Amino acid sequence: MDKKVTFGGKPVTLVGIRRKVGDKAPVFRVVDGELQSVSSERFADKVRIYSVFPSVDTSVCSLQNKRFNREAAALGDRVAVVSISVDLPFAQKRFCAAEGIDRVYVFSDYKELDFGMKYGFVIDELRLLARGVVVVDRDDVIRYIEYVHEITREPDYERALAVVRELVG
């Protein structure tokens, strides 16, 4: 399903399967900092926040990762915060080291766009991921999803975090 959002005020098309609250969260594979394939099933026993963004090399993406890193510390071990972009793992590692990102699992979807296509976040014109947040409960059900309409803006952290707090109550 195609879905238009804007990037710097210009329309872009999201491709892949657009998800909604209540959908079963599909399993996906991404690449870690050691270039190893990782399955989302690794976090099956936790509430998950998938923080999705175009690139670590932009100020808004940096803010998003820093915010979720702070929140991860407060949320504890019952929640896994997983950041996903199509940056190469080398760039992600460099960014995390420079910015002190140590509470978030950072993965790359550069190789197969598996997450991006299964969740509908791929920007067709740019082969980047759009900005957004997905919250998945321990039963693998999507409880919150945001496709940020203007990709250069931050997601609604408070709405996503309210859902997470309700789930871990």
Image (spheres, rainbow, N blue to C red):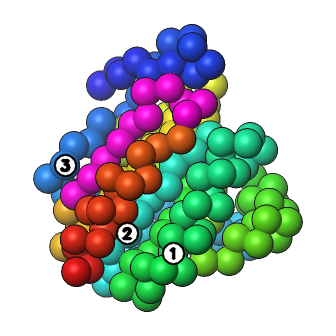
Which residue position is annotated with label 3?
Answer: 21
Q: What label does residue 72 carry, if any?
A: 1
The amino acid type of the residue labelled 2 equals Arg
Q: What's the distance in space between the residues labelled 2 and 3, CA to CA? A: 14 Å
Residue 57, quarter of picture: top right
Q: What label does residue 48 carry, if any?
A: 2
Q: Counting residues from the N terminus, which is met first, the one under dot 3 or under dot 1?
A: 3
Q: Which residues are magenta?
A: 142-153
Left or right: residue 15 versus residue 65 is left
* Pick the front one: 133 or 109: 133
Left or right: residue 38 versus residue 141 is right
Left or right: residue 9 versus residue 61 is left
* Pick the front one: 107 or 133: 133
**Element at label 1:** helix
Q: Position of residue 88 (x, y in %)?
A: 75, 52
* Pick the front one: 36 or 123: 123
Q: Residue at x 76, y 72 (%)?
A: 100
- The furthest residue to the bottom: 77
Local crowd at mark 2 within 10 Å, few (<14), some, or many (≥20)?
A: many
Residue 76, quarter of picture: bottom left
Q: Are marks 2 and 3 in contact (CB under 8 Å)?
A: no
Q: What label does residue 62 carry, if any?
A: none
The amino acid type of the residue labelled 1 equals Ala
